[in-house]
Amino acid sequence: MAPTAPLWFESIPAHPASRDAAAALQRRTASLAPVAVRSYFVVCAMEGWRRVQVDQLVAWSGVPPATLKRRLAAAGVTPAGVAAWNLALHAAWLLDVAALPAGAAVSCMRLARGSALRAVLGARGVRLAAGRVEPGAFAATLERYAAVLRAAFPQ
């Protein structure tokens, strides 16, 4: 049986839509990661609604840091990259699926300003214009992330 992340939920997302995003991310992507590091992917999906230090995500996952780095590096993926994808996906969900205004997404994600939201999304190829993303941005971004994981971890 695959390891799962501990049910610590130290933080409660600032918006109920963040929990929906976390569930969708976990369902769609966690099984694409190798069992030995899967709990890190689950933690990133669940806690990626706001910025969290990678070391904290690793600690919550229970995966030894050296094991995680070694397994991900062999696949051309980094712990920070996984966290960044999840942060961007949470932002895309809030703007696209939950249809929140950009200011509300910034607040929910505890970002300092709108430019931080633009940077988070832009780093993963999601365009934020006039406080909105294109319809379907979440699904398209999730598919790009899943493709990255499938390429990194062929089944």
Image: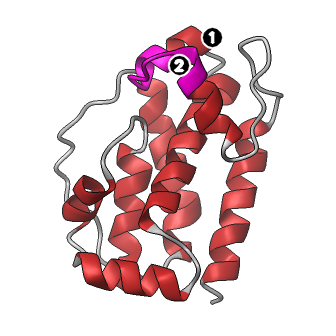
> What is the x, y in percent for residue 134?
83, 28
Q: Looking at the image, which is closer to me, 74 or 150?
A: 74
Q: Tell me if 113 is positioned left or right of 11 in this view.
A: right
> Magenta stretch: residue 106 in it?
yes
* Location of mark 2 (residue): 105
27 above or below 95? below
Kind of residue at disc 2: Ala
Quarter of the figure that contains the C terminus: bottom right
* Image location (x, y in percent) of residue 66: 28, 82
On residue 145, the disc is none
Secondary element type, mark 1: loop
Percent x, y of residue 152 = 63, 81
Q: Nearer the viewer, residue 105 or 81?
A: 81
Badge number at residue 101:
1
- Give neighbour class at mark 2: few <14, some 14-19, many 20+ (Cα, 10 Å): many
- What residue span does the magenta drawing correspond to? 105-116
| Residue 67 spot, x, y in % from top left | 30, 85
